[in-house]
Amino acid sequence: MENHTNLPLSPADEKLILQHREIFSKPVKIRLVLDDDPASQKMSSFCEQLVTLLPAIRLIQESADGELSGIFLSDNIHFMMVPTGKLLEAFLLALHGNETLAGQDMGVDAGELNARFTVPAILKIYVIDDCPYCGKAVPKGLFLAGAAASKVHIRIIDALMFPELAKSDKVKSAPATIMDDTFRWTGDFKIEEVIEMIAGRDPVQLGYDTLKMMISSGDAERVASLMDEYNTMIPAFRDLLTTEKWTERLGAMVAFEYLVEKNTALAGEVLDHLWEVFDTLDTAVMGDVLHLVGVLNQDSQDRRLKAVLEGEYPEVVRGVAGEVLRAGGRGKGREG
């Protein structure tokens, strides 16, 4: 065995990693997304050590640039931690790919899950070092991610490395498993319960991150179809349409355009919700909401457009309102 005593890994963790050296005969790519926080430095150091011990790993480093930092083993498996012990075992297993993850004996048929899950889900599992149940919960989440890679995205977060995230998710103990920012399990969970929740939940309960994931992966029309099928707005959709993050808002606007084609009445209801918060929005967001009014192109919106045009709004916002009125063949002769 080569001497790696200069690396800050425990002897047991180093030995565990080296046991996989011969197994990874072909290159394995992982993506390391870095921010300027101490957690990123720790994950970067770990990845450097990992590559030293497992030369087959190809490390791609990127700046976070608004994205959450962490180690991405695939598009749907995201570690925000430095894995050790049992969690390192789970991490190394995930490196072997979806087939290996789905091949774990969890007492359920992995082959059925992809068909049962009609809409994607994001599972966040908060962990801490030396947690007796974290090493049981994480493999179950990874099993689901391996069996239904296009439907289940898993984010494993060290609650002590990312205290602000843990605080925002109201995490008080570990493991804590959260789905769609709505459903949660404290401690180890029964995998059957999570499966039933993913398979049977109402799309209205989909969270912001799940909708964002669907749209960013090219599934904007699917979001519109879900709302059309249930004839109701997903509340998180309004949040996406009004976020100040332009790229996320743009994707939601594309989904709105699909919704206009599929269910014009429901698209009008969505705009009603946007008008309720219109005065609280950033100037750029106001302009995009007015653009959506133009996409819907209904006379019923004229009263509100005229109120914006004549109200105490930024000049650029009033200009957009005038453009939308004129583009619809209404309000001609008005100044923008």
Image (cartoon, grey):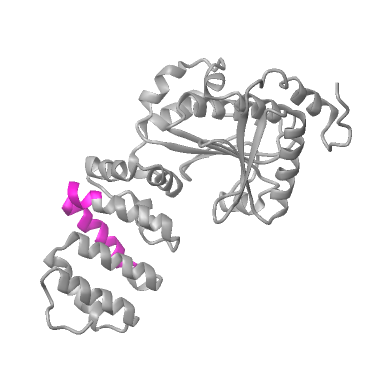
Which residues make up the magenta segment? 258-277
Q: Which residue is painted at 16% across and 63% down in the image?
A: 297
| In the displayed structure image, the side of residue 72 where residue 292 appears, left or right | left
Total marks shown come to: 0
Q: Which residue is painted at 24% across and 80% down in the image?
A: 309
| Quadrant in the picture for residue 299 | bottom left
| In the displayed structure image, the side of residue 277 where residue 310 appears, left or right | left
Using the rendered image of the protein, determine whether residue 239 is visible from the camera's viewpoint: no
Q: Which residue is painted at 77% across and 23% down in the image?
A: 18
Q: Looking at the image, is 303 positioned above or below residue 163?
A: below
Magenta stretch: dominant secondary structure: helix
Q: Is residue 276 within the magenta segment? A: yes
| In the displayed structure image, the side of residue 74 where residue 81 appears, left or right | right
Using the rendered image of the protein, determine whether residue 282 is visible from the camera's viewpoint: yes
Where is residue 161 drawn, in percent x and y?
A: 70, 47
| Quadrant in the picture for residue 56 | top right
Out of 328 and 264, give the one closest to the viewer: 328
